[in-house]
Amino acid sequence: MSRIDNLVAELAPEGVRFRPLGDLGEFIRGNGLQKKDLTDEGFPAVHYGQIHTHYGVWAESTKSFTSADTASKLRQANPGDLLIATTSEDDEAVAKATAWLGDTNVALSGDAYIYRHSLDPRYVSYFFRTEQFQSQKRPFVSGTKVRRVSGAALAKIRIPAPPLEVQREIVRILDQFTQLEAELKTELETELEARRRQYEHYRGKLLDFSSETPLRPLGELAHNLDSKRKPVTRDARTPGEIPYYGASGVVDYVSDFIFDGDYLLVSEDGANLLARSTPIAFSISGKTWVNNHAHVLQFETYAERRFVEIYLNSIDLSPYISGAAQPKLNKANLNRIPIPDPSFEVKERLVSRLDSFEALVNDLSVGLPAEIAARRKQYEYYRDKLLTFEEAI
């Protein structure tokens, strides 16, 4: 902070002027570019949705392109301009911005603005992430399901405009902090992935039973409660404390319940089972609703339920999925899945070991977001402090 303080004292001894964004540049609305116009090569192009999902504080290249003919009909940002997504379902994300630092112009879609200005591009982009900016923006956000802000409204927001040398020093410091944050996140995620692979390897060894271990169809090991599960229309899903489960976990909450106890849910969604994008089987406990896209199984003991959950999450269920247009794991196929049936003592010992190992992975899973969130909060505090100045009178 001392170098910035010294620069401000030297270059702006009477304080920093705060000026409306509209006084320092102009807002130009994007137009015409649709997702169907995006290609893998051609003229650089940015769709407003990509600003939300793909781009950070700045970008030097684009994820997508469009044809030269299409680009000639579109409004284009120059190097140094800000690209701003002005619609979102989330108020905080309205006016998310990226500084365009590429070597050429870039075409921009509608629901976005180009901000052509006289400031350091990355300085402005960092400012758009501060609480200073957010607090000024909120009164201008409008709309119901889709929230938006206009260029005319953005032009009224006041930005501290220190000398360019001060802006660049702030950018240099924040760039370093951003790089450190990204490196930490990569390191923690790599450690988490290594723990997960260790768990899967350990699970595979423990579930490698000899040919002497009997196999029994799942329908003989559990009581299937599918007749009690029910569809719930969206209108019936009212705010409440009772979780409403579907094929991939909690999908909503309701104020009533059907099941009350400990159960194993198994996804019926064939596409989910093939992609393994969510757990195939997962335990639930307490009062709950379960819709007609997840099977409900009841067991005598925790060890038996957890053993089946672990086993189902370790095997390929594609041989039991039927249907082409809408593949699913129906009740008959679920009930005939062969499950190893060692003694209760073996199940109990195996579950205990894997639960202990999984707890280590889950601790890191919980710790990873917490650590990243803590670092991000620290970074945001530091960023906002760097962009806070005494205003010139």
Image (tube, helix red, strand yellow):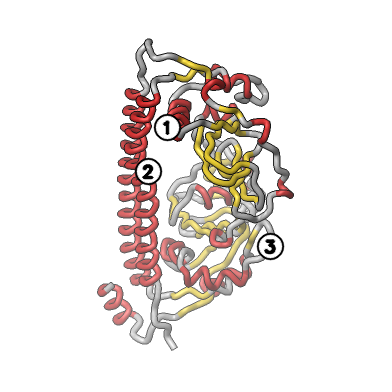
Contact between marks 3 and 2 (CB within 8 A): the answer is no
Residue at position x 60%, y 31% in the image:
295
Q: How far is the residue under mark 3 from the one under mark 1?
A: 51 Å
Residue 143 numbered mark, or none: 3
Whether residue 122 is visible here, answered yes or no, is yes
Label 1 Cα crowd, 10 Å radius (few <14 / some 14-19 / many 20+): some
Closer to the eye: label 2 or 1 = 1
- Which amino acid type is shown beneath numbered disc 3? Gly
Residue 263 locus on image (x, y percent): 54, 36
Could you tell me which quadrant the N terminus lies in?
bottom left
Query: Hey, which quadrant is residue 333 in on the image?
Result: top right
> In this rendering, would 189 be left or right of 77?
left
Whether residue 251 is visible here, answered yes or no, is no
Residue 218 locus on image (x, y percent): 53, 21
Task: Please tell me whether residue 101 is drawn above or below residue 382 in the rendered image.
Answer: above
Label 3 Cα crowd, 10 Å radius (few <14 / some 14-19 / many 20+): few
Question: Who comes first in sequence, dot 2 or dot 1?
Answer: 1
Mark 1 lies on residue: 303
Residue 362 numbered mark, or none: 2
Find numbered disc 2 in the image and state the secondary structure of the residue it sits on.
helix
Residue 32 locus on image (x, y percent): 66, 49
Task: Please tell me whether residue 39 is drawn above or below residue 176 in the rendered image.
Answer: above
